[in-house]
Amino acid sequence: MWLPCGCTSKYVASSFARRILASHLHVSGRSRCNVAAFMPEAAGFEGVSGRAALRELSVSNSESFWAAVARHRLSWSIPFHTVQDCDLSRGKIKWFEGGKLNVSVNCLDRHVHTCPERVALIWERDERGSEMKYTYRELLEMTCRVGNLLRRHGVKRGDCVTIYMPTCPLAVASMLACARIGAAHNVVFAGFSADALAERIRDAQSSTVITVNQGVRGGKVIELKKTVDTAVESCPTVKQVFVAMRTDNPVTMTARDIEDVVCEPAVMNSEDVLFLLYTSGSTGKPKGLVHTQAGYLLYAALTHRYVFSYHDGDVFGCVADIGWITGHSYVVYGPLANGATTVLFESTPIYPDPGRYWDMVERLKINQFYGAPTAIRLLLKYGDQWVNKYDRSTLKTLGSVGEPINTEAWEWYHRVVGDGRCPVVDTWWQTETGGICIAPRPSDPDAEIVPGMAMRPFFGIKPVLIDTERCFGFLQGELLTSNNTSGALCMAQPWPGMARTIHNNHQRFIETYFQPYPGYFFTGDGAYRSEEGYYQITGRLDDVINVSGHRIGTAEIEDVVVRAQLSCPAVAESAVIGYTHSIKGQGVYAFVVLKKGIDVKEADLSRQLNGMVSEKIAKYASPDFIQFAQRLPKTRSGKIMRRVLRKVVESDLEGLGDLSTLDDPAAVQEIIQGRRCHVMAQKR
Ligand code: WTA
């Protein structure tokens, strides 16, 4: 069915000494901040005279804080009666119950009433200089058309619609159309393969898919519709696929279309599902995290406004793809809830040349730029001239997300891109958290920012560190209360933006996030708390790696490698690990043990295995290195010692640590030897 609507290594910055002091970043004199001007609803909080006190209150009296913010920031059709009803030990999270609202009304209609001609979206298309603008009125109309179309074709409240599209206005309208009619959306990153897409469609039990005929990225055409065709062959639930054309031609309007631009919004409960978003965990099966209406929207909007110092009239440029949580929260929901002009970036940082981002900043007059460290590291290598060519004087805040930002990249971003005058906010958060949880801002305007550190918890966020050593089984790890210490990063109290469950698997939700440290939400990351109490993320504690800011479970890749059916099943076992990569942050390194008696050329096999990972998951998950081994180092109980493999790959033989639990220490020597041969072969 054709859609008639127009669419045309973690690096750990260790330089605590290298403080960027306030004076560097911000203007004159110590400003005594006026809390009510900063956050109007705070005027009602007694005794709160500064931002630090406001933060204090948001944690110590989080119910009052969130109640005031929710009343002030969201438009409700019926007000909520209970602020929160949460029990972290049972994975029960409910916010604003009794309240009814519609997310698309909050993102569109209320702005159309006050400023219909304000630009909502600037679509920075792949073809440089061909951007298209859509006002709030136009975006509402597009959303209503899609909403009506979906309703006419039987999509109901509570259904789940899969969206497999590049970042474009119709994708945003499709997300909002689902929200309008009360359906959940399941956006699948358009870089995922047919198999990965099919798995997500099946798990979400979607009967409707929305896609485009072809995508265009970096000058290349991507056959998205063909991928959908292949995927749906193994998805018996799918009944209809809507296909939009990526074309410039305006749509011819008929009288009926004009009627179409009104689409009655469904009145939704605060805790109805807004969307599912699949992300990787430490098993081979991706999990569909569930976010609900009011709490998610409120948290995305508040973090967008305060972390980036967004002000009315600003042009907000987050270059993430809508297929990731960053795209959901900071391309779509946060900015639109705040009535911002948000940029949809369809291209790549180096197309047609490495000046693309900064040319866009100049052309679109972007005020806040939010991107991933991997792109910053790549652009840094091309040199300052690509940045200096363009006028970046509109920039006020620079953001970083998705992975640790190393000091060199941070400083280049700050000094060259931001001319040394824009605060750089390294924002830590996850698909699970819904929005930014730790970032240098908001804070007093003259508060220091330490390079490569996320630093300060957001309003209502209470991070804690827990001793990782002492946590086994149901024994609770010890809460680390002092500063200058590292541990498992957990959250001690709930916040409105957090995920509510894993679709169809609440037990996995509880086991993953709430059982490791009972009473706390476990993030899966480790962190360091400095002498001053600032947080720095030290990396994942589980088998999840982060390649170019894209999260992937090593088990997912291992599953594909082990299942590889070549002329015959050739692979006995595999261990995949992440290693420090100068551009991607982490690269993928696969150890492969072949079945006995298999006679194949390793180079051929490597090529085939790479192809299979691209085909089954996505290109970014494909191994950078494949090392064939006779066996893998294992404990006596048969567990592969990945810690040892990581040390070998990072050439840290001193750091191999305790090998006494190894079943056969000679296996390590073989791996080291194999690695040496591998490195030498690469050099040749
Ligand atoms: C990592 C992306 C260091 C972290 C928003 C987290 C970071 C995972 C940072 C979530 C940061 C994200 N510094 N690490 N500023 N931001 N991460 O779900 O390991 O795609 O758990 O969400 O990325 O990835 P996700």
Image: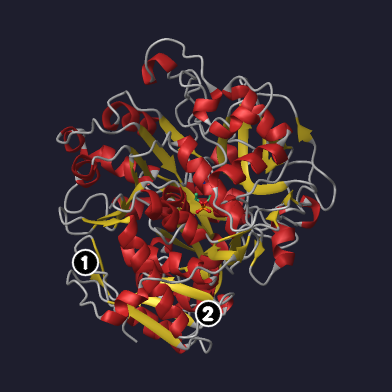
Residue 630 makes an appearance in the image: no
What secondary structure is marked by label 1?
Answer: strand
Q: Give the residue type at disc 1.
A: Lys
Give the numbered dot on residue 669.
none
From the viewer's perspective, is 185 left or right of 512?
left
State the residue at coordinates (61%, 37%): 527
Which corner quadrant holds the N terminus? bottom left
Which of marks 1 and 2 precedes in the sequence?
A: 2
Image-based side of 632 in relation to 154, left or right: right
Q: Which of the pair 398/402 is nearer the observer? A: 398
The residue indicated by pointer 2 is 206
Question: Is 655 rendered above or below residue 499?
Answer: above
Q: Residue 594 in the image: state x and y as whole percent.
A: 52, 72
| Number of residue marks | 2
* Residue nearer the viewer, 29 or 10: 29
Residue drawn at the location 23% of the way across and 58% of the way down? 125
Residue 667, picture quadrant? bottom right
Element at badge 2? loop
Q: Where is residue 277 in the image (x, y as percent from the top left)?
A: 53, 64
CA separation in Å, label 2 and label 1? 29 Å
Residue at far right of view: 475
- The residue drawn where x is 64% and y is 57% is 78
Circle on res. 220:
1
Q: What residue type is labelled 2?
A: Ser
Counting from the top left corner in percent of width and height, residue 509 is at 69, 61
Label 2 packing within 10 angstroms: few (<14), some (14-19), many (20+): many
**Placement of 356 over or under 44, stated as above or below:** below
Q: Tell me which corner region of the image, top left, top right, bottom left or bottom right, holds residue 365.
A: top left
Along the line of sight, the residue nearer the viewer: 575 or 261: 261
Examine the rendered structure and indicate whether residue 394 appears above or below residue 104. Answer: above
Q: Position of residue 270 (x, y in %)?
A: 64, 59
The reply to whether discs 2 and 1 touch (Cβ–Cβ < 8 Å) is: no
